[in-house]
Amino acid sequence: RAKDMGKNAIAVFCEEQCLEFTRRYRMDQEIKAAIAGREFRLVYQPIADARTLRVRKVEALLRWERDGTVVAPPSVFIPVAESSNSIREITRLVVEMACAQHAAWRLEGLSLPVAVNISSRCLNSDETISHIAACLNAYDVPPEALEVEITETTLMQNYERGNAMLCTLRDLGVRVSLDDFGTGYSSLQYLARMPIHALKIDRTFVQELLDEGGSLEIVETILGLARSLRLATVAEGVETAAQLSALRGMGVDYLQGYCLARPLPADDILTLCRRGMRLVPGDVEG
Ligand code: C2E
Ligand code: MG
Ligand code: MG
Ligand code: MG
C-alpha cells in the first residue's frame, strides 16, 4: 500500500498511474488513426450445432494488424477504446463490416448468421440502434441474420438502459446473446424479463469442466436455468474432444472453440462451408 509506505511510495504510485494514463492516451490516438487507416478487420469463428457439428453461425471477432503483424489483441485495445469514445466508431465499423460480409457471402450462395460483440459503452446510445437498422437496410440483411452479443457483467452495470435497448433490438428482429455468462451476477428476476435468445457459457467454466472440483455443477445449473427460461445455450472455448462430448451429453445446443475451428478469414469460412458445413473435432495442441 502506497499510503503505508510514506511519501516516496505515493510519488512512485502517481508516476505509474501517470504512465498508464499516457499509454492509454497514446493507444487511443493510434486506434483513431487505425480506423481511418483501415487496420481493423474481422475474423469469423464458427459456432456449430452440438448434435450435428454443422456450422450454424459465426462470431465476428476484431483484429488489429499493420503490415501483416498484430498491433494489439482485442483484450488490450477494446478496454482502451471503451475508456474513450473510440468504441463508438469501432462498433459502427464492426456492424458495417459484418453486414457487408453477410451480404458478400450470400452472393456466393452462403447464408450464414453473424454475431457481433457490442460494448456496454454503446448500450446507452440510440445511435447504435439506428446504425444497426441502417446497416441491415443498406446491405439488405434480414434482421435474424444478425446477432448481438453483450456481456452479462456490462449489461448488469446499467440494467434499465441496457434492457430498453435490448427491447428495441428485439422489435427490429435482431437476436441477442448474453456473453461470458456465469461470470456476472444476473438476478434471476432480471434474466426472466430480458428479451434475450441465448446464454453463452463462459470459457473458464468450459475449461474447468472436467477438472476435479471443477465447474460441472455450475454448467449444469446454467443449462437448467436456460431450459426453464427457454433460452438456447452456447459453450465457448471448447478445446478438447472430451469437453466436447461432455457438453453434448449435457444437452448444450451450440459449440464454439478451437477444438472445432479457430477464428478464420472470411474466405476460409466460405471454403469450409462449401466443403459441407460439418466440422471435425480435434484436440488443441500445446
Ligand atoms: P468473446 O466475445 O467472449 O470472444 C471469444 C474469445 O475467445 C475470442 O478471443 C476467441 O478467439 C477466443 N476463443 C474461442 N475459442 C477458444 C478456445 O477454444 N480457446 C481459447 N483459449 N480461446 C478461444 P478474442 O478474439 O481475442 O476476443 C477477446 C474478447 O475481445 C471477446 O471475447 C470480446 O469480448 C472482445 N472483442 C472481440 N472483438 C470485439 C468487437 O468487435 N467489439 C467488441 N466490443 N469487443 C470485441
Ligand atoms: Mg462474444
Ligand atoms: Mg464470449
Ligand atoms: Mg469470453
Image (tube, rainbow, N blue to C red):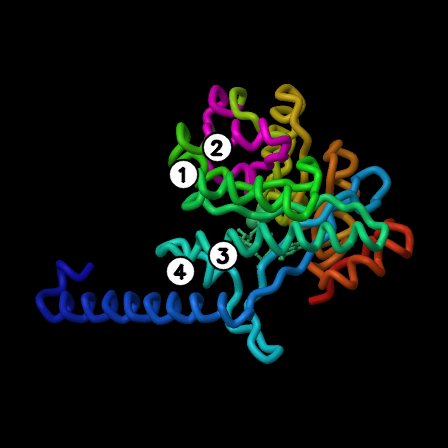
> Which residue was labeled with disc 4?
80
Task: Measure how far apart labels 1 and 4 are at the Cα level.
Answer: 18 Å
Task: Measure how far apart labels 4 and 2 are at the Cα level.
Answer: 23 Å
User: Furthest residue to the right?
Assistant: 275
* Viewer-proximal residue among 278 and 176: 176
Q: Callout 2: few (<14), some (14-19), or many (20+) C-alpha neighbours within 10 Å?
A: many
Residue flagged by tag 2: what amino acid is it? Answer: Met
Disc 3 C-beta below 8 A from ligand 1: yes
Residue flagged by tag 1: what amino acid is it? Answer: Asn
Q: Callout 3: few (<14), some (14-19), or many (20+) C-alpha neighbours within 10 Å?
A: many
- The circle on residue 165 is 2
Q: Is residue 1 left or right of residue 97?
A: left
Was residue 222 drawn as part of the magenta stretch in this picture? no
Which sits earlier in the primary sequence, circle 4 or circle 2?
4
Residue flagged by tag 4: what amino acid is it? Answer: Val
Proximity of marks 1 and 3: CB atoms separated by less than 8 Å: no
| Quadrant of the image containing the N terminus | bottom left
Task: Measure how far apart labels 4 and 3 are at the Cα level.
Answer: 12 Å
Which sits earlier in the primary sequence, circle 1 or circle 3?
3
Considering the numbered disc 3 on the image, is that residue within a helix, a strand or a loop?
Answer: helix
Task: Measure how far apart labels 3 and 2 are at the Cα level.
Answer: 19 Å
Q: Image point 51% across, 40% down: which residue?
A: 130
Proximity of marks 2 and 1: CB atoms separated by less than 8 Å: yes
> Which residue was labeled with disc 1?
124
